[in-house]
Amino acid sequence: MDHFPCSHALTAAWERNLDLTTLCADYYKRQTLIDAYSVPIIPVGHPSTWVMPFDIAQTVILNPISRSQAGRPMVGCHVSSSERTTTRSCRRCGQSGHNSRRCSNPPLINEGPSRGVPDEYRQLETTLTEKGSSSLGNG
Protein backbone atom coordinates (compact mmCIF):
# COMPACT_ATOMS: atom_id res chain seq x y z
CA MET A 1 0.00 0.00 0.00
CA ASP A 2 1.19 3.54 -0.64
CA HIS A 3 -0.97 5.36 1.84
CA PHE A 4 -1.74 5.53 5.55
CA PRO A 5 -4.54 3.11 6.48
CA CYS A 6 -7.72 4.22 8.20
CA SER A 7 -8.42 3.53 11.86
CA HIS A 8 -10.69 0.60 10.98
CA ALA A 9 -7.93 -1.17 9.07
CA LEU A 10 -5.43 -0.51 11.85
CA THR A 11 -7.85 -1.89 14.46
CA ALA A 12 -8.47 -5.01 12.39
CA ALA A 13 -4.72 -5.55 11.93
CA TRP A 14 -4.15 -4.98 15.66
CA GLU A 15 -6.82 -7.58 16.54
CA ARG A 16 -5.09 -10.14 14.28
CA ASN A 17 -1.64 -9.32 15.77
CA LEU A 18 -0.26 -8.12 12.42
CA ASP A 19 2.69 -5.74 12.11
CA LEU A 20 1.16 -2.29 11.56
CA THR A 21 4.24 -0.93 9.78
CA THR A 22 3.61 -3.27 6.86
CA LEU A 23 0.34 -1.46 6.14
CA CYS A 24 1.97 1.99 5.81
CA ALA A 25 3.95 3.37 2.91
CA ASP A 26 7.68 3.84 3.44
CA TYR A 27 7.47 7.62 3.48
CA TYR A 28 5.32 7.46 6.64
CA LYS A 29 7.98 5.54 8.56
CA ARG A 30 10.44 7.07 11.00
CA GLN A 31 13.50 5.59 9.29
CA THR A 32 12.64 7.40 6.05
CA LEU A 33 12.59 10.72 7.90
CA ILE A 34 15.93 9.97 9.54
CA ASP A 35 17.46 9.01 6.19
CA ALA A 36 16.14 12.18 4.52
CA TYR A 37 17.84 14.46 7.06
CA SER A 38 21.06 12.43 7.42
CA VAL A 39 22.60 14.23 4.42
CA PRO A 40 23.65 17.84 5.14
CA ILE A 41 21.48 20.50 3.51
CA ILE A 42 23.51 23.13 1.68
CA PRO A 43 21.85 26.54 1.26
CA VAL A 44 21.57 27.74 -2.34
CA GLY A 45 22.80 31.29 -1.72
CA HIS A 46 21.82 34.55 -3.38
CA PRO A 47 20.37 34.31 -6.94
CA SER A 48 23.15 36.55 -8.27
CA THR A 49 25.73 33.86 -7.38
CA TRP A 50 23.91 31.03 -9.17
CA VAL A 51 25.53 29.47 -12.24
CA MET A 52 22.92 28.99 -14.95
CA PRO A 53 23.37 27.43 -18.37
CA PHE A 54 23.09 29.91 -21.23
CA ASP A 55 20.01 28.32 -22.83
CA ILE A 56 18.09 28.43 -19.54
CA ALA A 57 19.14 32.03 -18.80
CA GLN A 58 17.90 33.14 -22.24
CA THR A 59 14.51 31.43 -21.92
CA VAL A 60 11.65 33.92 -21.76
CA ILE A 61 8.94 32.88 -19.34
CA LEU A 62 5.55 34.27 -20.29
CA ASN A 63 2.75 35.12 -17.92
CA PRO A 64 0.19 32.39 -17.43
CA ILE A 65 -2.92 32.53 -19.60
CA SER A 66 -5.55 34.08 -17.40
CA ARG A 67 -9.18 33.05 -17.50
CA SER A 68 -12.04 35.28 -16.54
CA GLN A 69 -13.97 34.46 -13.40
CA ALA A 70 -17.18 32.50 -13.71
CA GLY A 71 -20.41 34.38 -13.20
CA ARG A 72 -21.49 37.93 -13.75
CA PRO A 73 -18.64 40.41 -13.33
CA MET A 74 -18.86 42.91 -10.53
CA VAL A 75 -18.95 46.49 -11.76
CA GLY A 76 -17.81 49.16 -9.38
CA CYS A 77 -19.31 52.62 -9.30
CA HIS A 78 -16.97 55.09 -10.97
CA VAL A 79 -17.65 58.59 -9.68
CA SER A 80 -16.64 61.35 -12.06
CA SER A 81 -14.83 64.43 -10.82
CA SER A 82 -17.88 66.63 -11.46
CA GLU A 83 -20.15 64.53 -9.23
CA ARG A 84 -20.51 65.34 -5.57
CA THR A 85 -20.12 62.52 -3.11
CA THR A 86 -22.41 62.55 -0.11
CA THR A 87 -21.55 61.09 3.23
CA ARG A 88 -24.33 59.40 5.10
CA SER A 89 -25.29 60.72 8.46
CA CYS A 90 -27.15 59.14 11.33
CA ARG A 91 -30.82 60.05 11.78
CA ARG A 92 -30.58 59.40 15.49
CA CYS A 93 -27.60 61.55 16.54
CA GLY A 94 -26.81 63.54 13.37
CA GLN A 95 -23.15 62.50 13.13
CA SER A 96 -21.65 61.26 9.88
CA GLY A 97 -19.85 57.99 9.40
CA HIS A 98 -22.52 55.58 10.61
CA ASN A 99 -26.25 54.97 10.37
CA SER A 100 -28.97 54.74 12.97
CA ARG A 101 -28.75 50.97 13.18
CA ARG A 102 -25.15 51.07 14.43
CA CYS A 103 -25.51 54.26 16.48
CA SER A 104 -24.39 54.10 20.10
CA ASN A 105 -24.72 57.84 20.78
CA PRO A 106 -27.65 59.35 22.67
CA PRO A 107 -30.45 60.60 20.39
CA LEU A 108 -30.86 64.28 19.60
CA ILE A 109 -33.94 66.07 20.88
CA ASN A 110 -35.67 67.18 17.71
CA GLU A 111 -38.15 70.02 18.03
CA GLY A 112 -39.10 69.95 14.35
CA PRO A 113 -41.82 67.84 12.79
CA SER A 114 -41.33 64.12 13.14
CA ARG A 115 -41.09 62.08 9.97
CA GLY A 116 -44.17 60.41 8.58
CA VAL A 117 -46.61 61.68 11.20
CA PRO A 118 -49.52 63.75 9.83
CA ASP A 119 -50.12 67.22 11.31
CA GLU A 120 -53.50 66.23 12.78
CA TYR A 121 -51.95 63.49 14.89
CA ARG A 122 -49.14 65.79 16.02
CA GLN A 123 -51.65 68.44 17.12
CA LEU A 124 -53.73 65.81 18.90
CA GLU A 125 -50.62 64.51 20.65
CA THR A 126 -49.63 67.96 21.92
CA THR A 127 -53.20 68.63 23.07
CA LEU A 128 -53.32 65.36 24.99
CA THR A 129 -49.97 65.96 26.66
CA GLU A 130 -51.04 69.49 27.69
CA LYS A 131 -54.31 68.18 29.15
CA GLY A 132 -52.51 65.37 30.92
CA SER A 133 -49.96 67.69 32.51
CA SER A 134 -52.63 70.22 33.57
CA SER A 135 -54.81 67.52 35.13
CA LEU A 136 -51.80 66.22 37.04
CA GLY A 137 -51.03 69.70 38.36
CA ASN A 138 -54.58 70.24 39.70
CA GLY A 139 -54.83 67.03 41.63
Image (cartoon, rainbow, N blue to C red):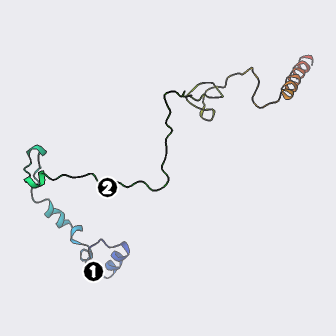
Left or right of 41, for residue 15: right
| Residue 34 higher or lower than 62, as above or below | below
Q: Quadrant of residue 38?
A: bottom left
Image quadrant in which the N terminus is located: bottom left
Q: Are marks 1 and 2 in contact (CB under 8 Å)?
A: no
Question: Residue 64, percent across and down?
Answer: 29, 54
Question: Residue 11, percent across and down?
Answer: 35, 76
Q: Quadrant of residue 96?
A: top right
Question: Residue 9, percent across and down?
Answer: 35, 77
Q: Secondary structure at mark 1?
A: loop
Say which label, 1 or 2, has the lower sequence index.
1
Work out whether residue 120 or residue 55 is closer to the camera in this orientation and state it. 55
Left or right of 108, for residue 57: left
| Residue 36 higher or lower than 6, as above or below | above
Q: Secondary structure at mark 2?
A: loop
Q: Quadrant of residue 119?
A: top right
The answer for how far apart the CA atoms under marks 1 and 2 are is: 52 Å
Question: Residue 14, percent across and down?
Answer: 32, 77
- Residue at position x 49%, y 36% from top? 78
- Residue at position x 30%, y 71% from top? 4
* Front tag of 1 and 2: 2
Amino acid type at image mark 1: Leu
**Label 2 packing within 10 angstroms: few (<14), some (14-19), many (20+):** few
**Label 1 packing within 10 angstroms: few (<14), some (14-19), many (20+):** few
Work out whether residue 13 or residue 85 is closer to the camera in this orientation and state it. 85
| Residue 42 higher or lower than 121, as above or below | below
**Mark 2 lies on residue:** 65
Amino acid type at image mark 2: Ile
**Mark 1 lies on residue:** 18
Image quadrant in which the C terminus is located: top right
User: Where residue 76 is drawn, which disc sits there?
Assistant: none
